[in-house]
């Protein structure tokens, strides 16, 4: 019981995501990153403030992959939960979307978390190939691989971030 609670990976992931997403750094990132990106075409230093997020560098890739894997799992769970809710709704007029809504909220939180991690590695330096670029590709690859799932739980901000990375990668 107690040892299993200490080793619960999903609890750790949720706690890490909730802590990161409740930070002032995250709120500032989500509110201002796109504006700063589009206004700073010549100034690559203005985005540097977003590279230092509250997630240790060695854990970023692992937590991001775990979060995206969990989004896949939640997507299936939401689908089946909606099927059950629709069956209940057909036989009963009482609607209860609380279980699928809780799963959807978790998926949205994890999409935010995953893109926050990936975005921490976006650089504006064109032509320069360094370790940061390699890390950027490794953090964006899982996002690209799970595009068809996470977009269900994203908002336009997430899609624009992905497209910025995608077209920047094509231009290199």
Image (tube, grey):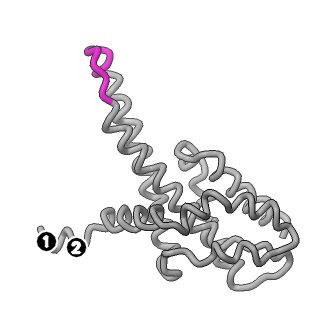
For the point 72% across and 72% down, which residue is it? Answer: 47
For the point 55% across and 69% down, which residue is it? Answer: 25
Residue placed most toward the observer, 94 or 170: 94
Where is residue 19? Give x, y as percent. Answer: 41, 66
Tell me where residue 46 sits by quadrant: bottom right
Residue lying furthest bottom: 131
Is 93 left, or right, of 110 in this rendering?
Answer: left
Residue placed most toward the observer, 46 or 122: 46
Where is residue 170? Give x, y as percent. Answer: 81, 63
Where is residue 157? Give x, y as percent. Answer: 65, 51
Residue 93 inside the magenta-drawn segment: yes
**Which quarter of the image is occupied by the C terminus?**
bottom right
Circle 2: element type: helix
Circle 1: element type: helix
Tell me where residue 85 sits by quadrant: top left
Position of 21 relative to 108 (above/below): below
For the point 42% across and 56% down, which residue is it? Answer: 70
Q: Residues within 10 Å of mark 1 (few under 14, many from 20)?
A: few
Q: Residues within 10 Å of mark 2 (few under 14, many from 20)?
A: few
Position of 104 relative to 167 (above/below): above
Residue 159 inside the magenta-drawn segment: no
Q: Which residues are magenta?
A: 88-96
Is 70 left, or right, of 140 in this rendering?
Answer: left
Is 128 left, or right, of 139 in this rendering?
Answer: right
Which mark, residue 6? 2
**Which quarter of the image is occupied by the N terminus?**
bottom left
Question: What is the CA distance from the residue labelled 2 to the residue labelled 1?
Answer: 6 Å
Where is residue 62? Give x, y as percent. Answer: 47, 73
Asked whether the beta carbons under mark 2 and mark 1 sit within 8 Å of each other, the answer is yes
For the point 52% across and 45% down, which residue is it? Answer: 153
Say which residue label 1 marks.
Answer: 2
């Amino acid at each position: 019981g107690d040892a299993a609670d200490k080793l619960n990976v999903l609890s750790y992931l949720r706690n890490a995501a909730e802590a990161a997403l409740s930070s002032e750094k995250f709120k500032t990132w989500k509110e201002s990153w796109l504006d700063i990106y589009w206004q700073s075409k010549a100034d690559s230093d203005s985005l540097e403030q977003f590279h230092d997020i509250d997630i240790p560098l060695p854990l970023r890739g692992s937590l991001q992959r775990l979060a995206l894997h969990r989004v896949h799992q939640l997507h299936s769970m939401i689908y089946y939960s909606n099927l059950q809710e629709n069956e209940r709704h057909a036989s009963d007029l009482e609607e209860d979307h609380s279980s699928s809504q809780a799963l959807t909220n978790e998926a949205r939180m994890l999409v935010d978390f995953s893109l926050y991690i990936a975005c921490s590695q976006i650089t504006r330096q064109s032509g320069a190939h360094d370790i940061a670029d390699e890390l950027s590709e490794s953090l964006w690859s899982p996002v690209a691989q799970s595009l068809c799932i996470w977009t269900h739980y994203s908002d336009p901000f997430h899609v624009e971030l992905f497209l910025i990375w995608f077209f920047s990668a094509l231009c290199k």
